[in-house]
Amino acid sequence: MKKIFTLILFAVCCTTTHSVVAQNGQFREYNGEVLEEGSNKSLALATISIENTNISTITNTDGEFSLKVPLTTKNAQVIIAFLGYETKSIPLTTLNQKNNKIHLKVAVTALEPVNINAPKDAEKLVREVLSKKGEHYLDAPSIMTAFYRETIKKRRRNVSLSEAVVNIYKSPYASDKNDAMRLYKARKSTDYNKLDTVALKLQGGPFNTLYVDLMKYPEYIFAGGLVDEYRFKYEGSTLIDDRQIYVIAFNQLESIADPLYKGKLYIDVENKTLVSAVYQLNITDREKASRLFVRRKPAQVDVWPTEVAYRVDYREKNGKWYYGYSNILMEFKVNWEGKLFNSLYSMAAEMAVTDWKQNTEQQNLKNKEKLKRSTILADEAIGFSDPDFWGEYNIIEPEKSIESAIKKIQRQIKRANKNGAAKP
């Protein structure tokens, strides 16, 4: 039985098409926060985009954003959207370059008392949505620029951060052809001292987040008869981008022993399109779940996942939807034979499309340019360098904890290099 992310593997061992936006520094950067009106609660993963363009970014877990806009873009509207909140549109000219605070109102959806708009058969609705991916989603080849980040923490301490700008050669949603990717630029920072004697590496890199695109790759969860192994239930409505959305909850049947998934699908009422999904692995069997993710490990170590969660968001332009953002959170326990306490590690990966254009010239990557699904980004990245390059791209604003970790790691690396150079 095929499971999602058989390509998300962990090795546990001892121890030139790029963005058409803002080239050559011809851009203006806007920074700020997205907050809930009234409570001032930070809104993580809110989308900030320029109307009628493909330029966008995502707020980080602190609700902070950095949006880079070409100087040629003037008199534009900035669209701020977040699940369950009213979408806001503000003129770009009203934004300051720093310390913007944008407040969103909680959306209140008025439904009939007896929910007459509720789908009578939630499973039938899901099947209909999956069958219409060629009709409602991108139907032409596209080249996307995306920002990718993966982090590793030991308990609450950041120990590794890798980031990349990638080009996604995305095939039409109705096509069986897989997407291809090119690694355009990558950087990393790792404090191996905090990893003790265990190094965790994420195999697959950006492909892991790309395969969360349920509408392009439904086979990883709902392949063939797998839909029959889930129970679907209507759980009310909400608003996304001022659209009324069905919330469909799903969970595997009690009779299914293998670990499958549970979560929620957010489906546009009018067009029957999936606009977002949030779900997680049911860890019904620790050993089976471990075999899904652990590629190699020392014989004296037990490694198993305690949580595996996913999210994907779609965006719409000119009546066509496309993959915009996804993230993965995985927590693992590492138990060394003879040790009294377990080590707890978490690995997070996220990718946001920041720009895209149609691949009208049918450009294809050569085999040597293609990013391999077996790639370990931390091995490909070259360290935190080339700040001029990173300044030109829309990236997800670093979290305060990550920024702090980077500075500490860089200081340790410099100190280690200095001490090493002083030795005879």
Image (cartoon, rainbow, N blue to C red):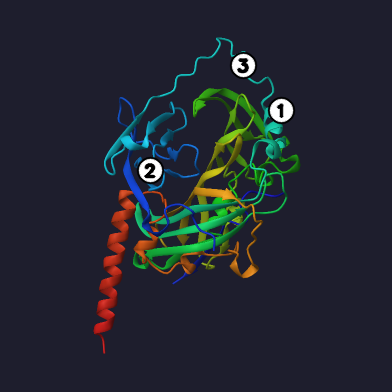
The amino acid sitting under disc 1 is: Lys
State the residue in front, 366 or 116. 366
- What SS does tag 1 mark? helix
Label 1 vs 2, first from the N-terminus: 2
Identity of the amino acid at label 2?
A: Thr
Q: Is residue 53 visible?
A: yes
| Quarter of image, res 213 | top right
Regarding residue 398, the answer to whether it shows in the image is: no
Residue type pointed to by label 3: Asn
* Residue 358: image location, x then y, percent: 60, 49
Q: Please tell me which residue lies in front, 229 or 341.
A: 229
- Label 2 crowd (10 A; few <14 / some 14-19 / many >=20): some
Secondary structure found at label 2: loop
Q: Position of residue 256 (x, y in %)?
A: 68, 39
Residue underneath mark 1: 124
The residue that appears at 53% across and 59% down in the rendered structure is: 205
Residue at the spot of label 3: 117
> Image check: 174 left or right of 341?
right
